[in-house]
Amino acid sequence: MSDRTKKTTAMGFFHMNGFVPSYRQATQFAREIGHVGSMLDVIDARLVTPPDSLKGHYPNNPSPWDQYYTTMSAEYVGMSTSGVKILIVAHGVGPMSNEKGVIDAYKLDPGGERELRGSGRITTEEFHKLESFHYGPVSIVELTPYMEERKYPFISMLQVSTAMLDPIIEARLGSRAAEYLQEHKRLALQFHQEEHGLDPEDDQYDPFIIKADSPSNCSYVHRDPEDGYAFAHLLSIGQISHASSNDYGKWPAWSCDVSPHGWGDGTRMFGVREGEISRIAKGPDASKLLLQHWRELMQDSRLSEAPEGPFVLMQMPDETWFTQTEKQGARVDTYEPEFEVVSMEKVGKPTKFYTESNYPVPIFRYDRREALAVLPEGINAYALVGEPSRTDSSDNPETCLVQGYRITINHKQRLINKKVLADDFDHMMGLQATKVT
């Protein structure tokens, strides 16, 4: 049965506003008969659905190995009833097994120093309920001996032989951890055979495949939770990457991380319907839907006259020109289409402008005033031309060409705002190319 005829039993949902809308859309997909996916579901999906390619990813239809997922598995660290520091992993049960519990944990701020976007907490009372299996089965790891036995706990990428003996890796991955690690090893070895000439008869090679992090903002090694509380985080698993380091041997590691989720981290929850999980379909992307279905998504603007501009321009995949929604300050252009351009005329020639707004990252940031300063009078729109480039000047480290235009727009209609569309589950699913059965 092909992917086109299989029933879609799982779908992932990324949302720019994080956990709450991502969780709610996953819940809507799952319906009453399903659930929002845990780490156990990701492991099941990876074991039954191999990557389409070991070399790279298919962004429009990724395999479960080619995406990161935030899950409804949770990890807690605190003091046990006997007074020792322990780590508890609970898959889909416990105080963070629903939306309210997750929000309450990340909002809890016993020290008054954190914000909602940071790390989570539960009370010691709740932690001890987990420890006593009040909510159901959990995995418990005593942390002090774990950290004493390892030179760099929660930092090192692990080889298969080490990962197979690591109790936190086992706890985070769940009951099929050993099976998963063996499959990950098989695929990593196949990658090294195809890409680096590893002898297929060499059964001694022990590839680096997985990393178990601690939270970025409350290290398990260097920090204990406040009195009366325990650390609490959802668990995420990363997509496969080709990580390079002298510590990983002569070849890049075909690897992923499994780690606690910070509130401000990117969030992709997934819903699971009744039935066997296989490929986790990619949920609708509001940005792509705007580009693909813009004619269907135009709305009455309620404007009596056209805004004056100046506008930043962009082209749709069908080469129709649009204005972009306005950005504020020195940042990347929004690339969110707003008004259709009905006529345009070049004014002058492409001209270089320089910016001190950017810093050494791949994304080009600039202030509109920097581009407008070099453009001729009479323009009401512009577009960047070509790719930005570095200069030798420390004051103006990057430059780009910009072309001025005089345009008219259809101000009576405006494309739906991306954030509005991103919050409209039913509308997006109706536009989604992948039909859900």
Image (spheres, rainbow, N blue to C red):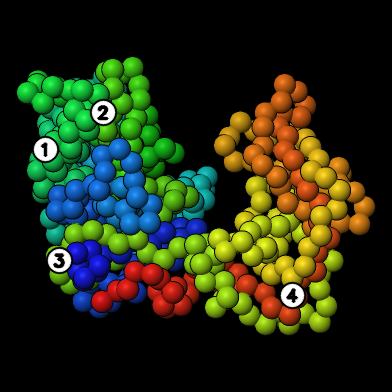
Query: Mark 1: which secondary structure?
Result: helix
Residue 126 left/right relative to 312: left
Residue at position x 23%, y 64% from top?
Answer: 3
Q: Nearer the viewer, mark 3 or mark 1?
A: 3
Residue 152 left/right relative to 179: right
| Circle 3 residue | 1
Q: CA distance from mark 4 to mark 2?
A: 52 Å
Label 3, residues with CA under 10 Å away: few <14, some 14-19, many ≥20 = few
| Circle 2 residue | 195
Label 1, residues with CA under 10 Å away: few <14, some 14-19, many ≥20 = some
Please provide percent x and percent y for residue 116: 49, 54
Q: CA distance from mark 3 to mark 4?
A: 47 Å
**Mark 2 is on which residue type?**
Glu
Q: Nearer the viewer, mark 4 or mark 1?
A: 4
**Mark 4 is on which residue type?**
Asn
Earlier residue among tags 3 and 2: 3
221, 174: nearer the viewer:
174
Earlier residue among tags 3 and 4: 3
Residue 410's tag is 4
Residue at position x 86%, y 42% from top?
Answer: 374
